[in-house]
Image: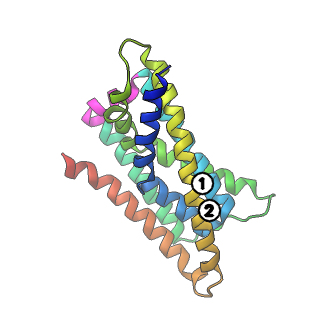
Amino acid sequence: MPELTTLLLFALAASVLVAIPGPNHLYIVTRSISGGRRAGLASAAGVETGTLVHVAAAAVGLSAIVASSAVAFDVVRYLGAAYLVFLGIRALRGEGIDVPEATGQNGSLRRVYVDGVIVNVLNPKVALFFLAFLPQFLDPSRPVSGQVVTFGLVLIAIGLTSNVAYALAADALGGWLRRRPGFARRQGMVVGGIYLTLGAAAALTGSRQR
């Protein structure tokens, strides 16, 4: 268990980093605008479930393996990019866009949740976050895995709060847009374009960095 002062410093620094918009936020905003509040909240929960997978991976050293192996990093990066492109193509074809608000439509919400998990799990930048940022707060004299889990849970709590805020704000915007006659015809193109852009960015960013 980290010291309280260290934990508070980590929470403050993590809050600043999490507040910066990124691919996960864009995914949540897209889902909220196209599917409504429940879709946005389901996607937010999915994204943070994906973060939980990264926390577990970091605790056992898997993220270190991915970051140290160029091949493994590229495999994860391209899988993530390919999945975003797949979501974009589905959206352009009019599939998987509207998520009904009715309580009986849980199947669609489960799909949104699972998509959020996959999008975040296949984002190697999250694994690199744990390697580049988290070690600054670790105390080598204490059990490292326990510290990683503690910091990870704090990060998930902060991330979930941020994601919910984005989802609610995007739902309000989506409600305004859905009252516009032309939005229903255009939302598939807009959503698909966002996913395809995210996929291209995920595929190209690592190449430019190297």
* Main SS category, magenta section: helix
Camera sees residue 135: yes
The magenta span reads 61-72
- Residue at position x 36%, y 38% in the image: 129
In depth, the one of 209 and 86 nearer the eye is: 209
Q: Where residue 1 appears, x then y in whole percent?
A: 50, 19
Are discs 1 and 2 less than 8 Å apart at CB? yes
* Location of residue 58 with respect to 208 vertically, above or below: above
Q: Where residue 87 appears, x then y in whole percent?
A: 50, 60
Q: Secondary structure at mark 2?
A: helix
In depth, the one of 176 and 113 nearer the eye is: 176
Q: Which residue is mark 1?
A: 164
- Rounded to the nearest angstrom, the CA distance separating label 1 from label 2 is 6 Å
Q: Which residue is mark 2?
A: 168
Could you tell me which quadrant the C terminus lies in?
top left
Q: Where residue 85 appears, x then y in whole percent?
A: 43, 59
- Residue at position x 47%, y 53% in the image: 24
Three-letter code for the amino acid on which mark 1 is drawn? Val
* Location of residue 208 with respect to 169 vertically, above or below: above
- Residue at position x 42%, y 35% in the image: 9
The answer to if 71 sits in the magenta stretch is: yes
